[in-house]
Image (tube, helix red, strand yellow):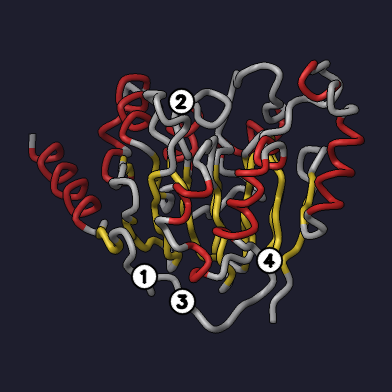
Amino acid sequence: MKGRYVILLLSLAAIASVTVIQRRGARSHAISQPVSTPVEVTYIANEGFLIASGEQKVLVDALVREGVKPYPVPSSATRERLEKAQSPFDGVDLVLASHFHPDHFDPLAVAEHLANNPQARFISTRQSVEKLKTAFDRYEAIESRVTGLLPKEGERMSLTHGGINLQILNIHHGRNRPFENLGLLFEVGGRKFLHIGDSEASADDFKSYDLVKDKIDVAFIPYWYFMSDDWKRAIRQHLKPAQIIVMHLPVLSEKSEFIEKRGGWTKVFSDIKAEFPNAVIFEKEMDKTVISGQ
């Protein structure tokens, strides 16, 4: 009983460390470090990435098992290293999941990583945390390092862990769909990264966050944002990242009528690069890019 009480206090302390820092139209200064160092971004699968600089490491949408076809999942060897917190996935500070869908989050994969990496903190939606509680029979052992959040639209929540500043945004996964989806704005190595999960937010939705003022270095953006004038306007006018990483690509050998009508993936990639020369497109697990320091 005493152990349960201590865990409850730690869990409450973790929740108390989360602060609502922005309402519509307000400016946040929570993420601001003048010094930047090289940051390595490693593609894992679908929307899963490892972002690392020095001793700072963030995993986002990477702890996946079965996934959802036709989207790729980590190979068995990479999945084992992820869940056992083995190099290069050792010493991860923040484990993030934009939402609970199985191509972005697997509760047991997350639980295994947390069990093997006592310094990691998991942040996701309330829906993801409920699935984690239900699936993992030793949940009490990791509960103090698990936080489920969903700010109001137009507001941000802020927390810091392992010296990494994180802001959480509410960016919808389809206006009338019942799936909580987070925008994750964090700083590693003095560089600002925005991962928008499976967002279907419009240009006007993004406008309320005034993200241009955040001076985003890298934005992780699903490929469908490059198929619509409104979504492309959201990127150009309301995100303005220095670099883009295109994500949520299916297994490219899988046939897609939607893509075939646009000339196939080679043509689609060429069109994206023509309009957004700062876009990076990963096609192979564990491919990397380095965001250079100033």
Q: Residues within 10 Å of mark 3 (few under 14, many from 20)?
A: few
Q: Nearer the viewer, mark 3 or mark 4?
A: 4
| Residue type for callout 1 | Ser
Work out whether residue 224 or residue 217 is closer to the camera in this orientation and state it. Answer: 224
Q: Element under label 3?
A: loop
* Nearest to N terminus: mark 4 or mark 2: 2
CA gap, disc 2 to disc 3?
A: 34 Å
| Cβ–Cβ under 8 Å for marks 1 and 3 | no
* Nearest to N terminus: mark 4 or mark 1: 1
| Cβ–Cβ under 8 Å for marks 4 and 1 | no
Residue assigned mark 4: 242
CA gap, disc 4 to disc 1?
A: 20 Å
Residue assigned mark 2: 108
Q: Element under label 1?
A: loop
Residue assigned mark 1: 28
Q: Element under label 4?
A: loop
Residue assigned mark 3: 32
| Residue type for callout 2 | Leu
211 vs 270: above or below: below
CA gap, disc 4 to disc 2?
A: 35 Å
CA gap, disc 1 to disc 2?
A: 35 Å
Residue 169 percent coordinates (x, y): 40, 50
Instruction: Specify the quadrant that holds the N terminus.
Output: top left
